Amino acid sequence: MIIRRETPEEFSKIYDLVKIAFQTAKVSNGKEQDFVNHLRAGGNYIPELALVSEENGILIGHIMLTKTYIVNNSNKYQALLLAPISVALKHRNKGVGSHLIRESFKLAKEMGYTAVLLVGDPAYYHRFGFNAAINFGIKNTHNIPDKYVMACELVPGALNGISGTNDLGL
């Protein structure tokens, strides 16, 4: 398995991978593939943190980390948004998602980023250091239940003293 940056030439393959992967996800609104395009088109896209997992020349996984901000009055604190992560059904439960997360976090930390936010299943994401964002004083602006909006410090203490709201890229 190879993990590498996505390329513009494979955006349509990634679109299909994300769409099909989320058809069998526990939670999905059916628009995750469009959300990927929305994030790429925005000013918060970071090509170095949009990765694919490839096996025998076939894309089997994808992850994106994009810039996001925690806003408190006139203060803005930069973080990353992990959204979405996708793994082809027949490659799930084999560590593909874990490898994508760990590699993207390693690269993000090397680039100077200190924290990551996401919306996801606490049972899955706790193993990577995620906790409810509300525990850090971070609220979402979309009335998503607090237990699903999570934060992870790439650098210990990165979220100390930071509180505010985040729009989760929506």
Image (tube, helix red, strand yellow):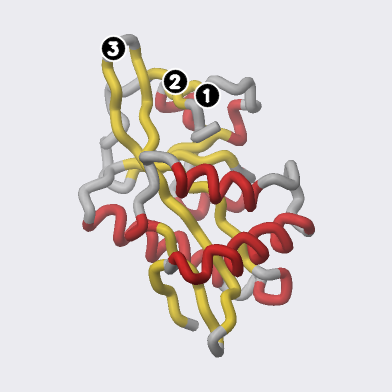
Of the residues shown, which amino acid type is indicated by label 2? Thr
Measured as percent of width and height from the top left, residue 30 is found at 74, 47
Evaluate if marks 3 and 2 touch, with contact meaning CB atoms under 8 Å apart: no
Label 2 residue SS: strand
Measured as percent of width and height from the top left, residue 85 is found at 56, 56
Of the residues shown, which amino acid type is indicated by label 3? Ser
Q: Residue at x 59, y 65 (%)?
A: 12
Give the vertical position of 6 relative to 27 (above or below). below
**Mark 2 nearby-residue class (10 Å; few <14, some 14–19, many ≥20):** some
Q: Residue at x 60, y 22 (%)?
A: 142
Residue named by callout 1? 140
Q: Quadrant of the C terminus?
A: top right
Which residue extends farthest front? Answer: 9
**Mark 1 nearby-residue class (10 Å; few <14, some 14–19, many ≥20):** some
Give the vertical position of 40 relative to 104 (above or below). above
Of the residues shown, which amino acid type is indicated by label 1? Asn
Which residue extends farthest top? Answer: 73
Label 3 residue SS: loop
Number of marks drawn: 3
**Mark 3 nearby-residue class (10 Å; few <14, some 14–19, many ≥20):** few
Q: Residue at x 64, y 59 (%)?
A: 18
Evaluate if marks 2 and 1 touch, with contact meaning CB atoms under 8 Å apart: yes
Q: Earlier in the sequence, mark 2 or mark 1?
A: 1
Q: Earlier in the sequence, mark 3 or mark 2?
A: 3
Label 1 residue SS: strand
Q: Nearer the viewer, mark 1 or mark 3?
A: 3
Residue named by callout 2? 165
Is 98 in front, or is 129? 98
Rounded to the nearest angstrom, the CA distance separating label 2 from label 1 is 5 Å
Residue named by callout 3? 74
